[in-house]
Amino acid sequence: MNKILCGLFLLAQVAVADPKVERLVEGLEFTEGPVWVPEKEGVVFSDVRASKLYLWTEKKGLEVFREASGRGNGNVLDAEGRLITCEGGNTRVTRLEKDGTFTVLASEFEGQPLNNPNDVTVGKDGSVYFTDPNFGKKDRVDFQFVYRVKPDGEVEKAIPQSFNKPNGIAMSPDGKILYVNVGMDHWTLAYPVNDDGSVEDAPKRVADGIDKVLDGLAVHPATGDLYLAVFTNNRNQPDEQGIQIFSAKGKYQGMIPIPGNTTNVCFGEDENTLYVTSGGSLFRVTLQ
């Protein structure tokens, strides 16, 4: 192992072994979808059940960012810094424009309404990818797809097959791999992405054998390691919830315990700072 790789390996081990975990916000209902917004110098995240988006900054603390978010869930910024949100209650994906108006990117496919858009990411070509599980529905169990909104606005299935509760989704730093958490099947799939934004149906399981529910995920901007939000419904195992870390090739690196049902994670102002939503709280994790 060369010195650079060895250094990165040791950094990952130290980060997992001795992170600093701070609770920044508590007392909300069900937090999700954190995204760092450089323009605001803070993190925007969802309170799904309250149907609000919040902004937390070091200077001002917690502020309401958007009322009536349509049970907003996953969030991401595009290359222009515009916020894209999965509005599960409104069964649509929207983009907040710079003038404060909203553009609906997707609300149906082939004349049928979406289920419950859950999480979202953006590709190098501007394509928007989102998961659409059937949470809250008893039917449409075979219509849980990952969709792509092409740069021209056309909505297509990014991947042809239906999943069992597709959930977290993220892009590799180079834009060549699309990661999908299939929460109820307990694995993370990696799909090659072509230069035109199309996804090859040739997945590899890069995180497998996890005995917990997989929710959101983030990809380390430098190493490509996967940071997976996991939780268990067993209240007797509080230390089994948090962020599990895998290398891009699927090697388990360690666990960062987070109190509550951990739902999602994003990198913040630098590659050593994570923001994590869990239960009704927002946490900041500093990787040592």
Image (spheres, helix red, strand yellow):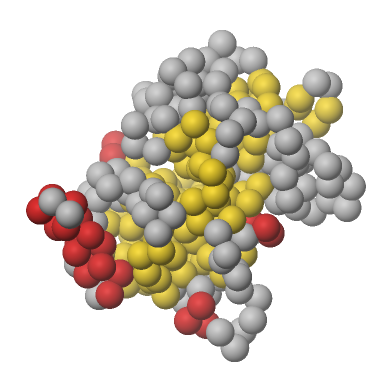
Q: Residue at x 28, y 47 (%)?
A: 223
Residue 167 place in picture, x, y as percent: 62, 49
Asked if residue 28 is positioned above or below residue 1 in the image, the reply reads: below
**Which residue is more in the foreground, 247 or 182?**
247
**Which residue is more in the foreground, 28 or 238?**
238
Looking at this view, name the residue that lies furthest to the top.
Answer: 152
Residue 91 appears left or right of 191:
right
Residue 87 appears left or right of 178:
right
Looking at this view, name the residue that lies furthest to the bottom.
Answer: 236
**Which residue is more in the foreground, 182 or 64?**
182
Quadrant of the image containing the N terminus: bottom left
Q: Is residue 85 visible?
A: no
Looking at this view, name the residue that lies furthest to the right.
Answer: 139
Q: Residue at x 49, y 51 (%)?
A: 206
Asked if residue 236 is positioned above or below residue 32 in the image, the reply reads: below
Q: Residue at x 72, y 45 (%)?
A: 163
Residue 275 appears left or right of 10:
right
In the rendered image, which quarter is residue 24 located in?
A: bottom left
Residue 189 appears left or right of 132:
left
Residue 42 place in picture, x, y as percent: 32, 49
Residue 234 place in picture, x, y as percent: 64, 81
Q: Residue at x 49, y 61 (%)?
A: 229
**Which residue is more in the foreground, 204 or 79?**
204
Residue 286 place in picture, x, y as percent: 25, 64
Looking at this view, name the residue that lies furthest to the left.
Answer: 3
Q: Is residue 130 visible?
A: yes
Quadrant of the image containing the C terminus: bottom left
Asked if residue 166 is positioned above or below residue 148 in the image, the reply reads: below
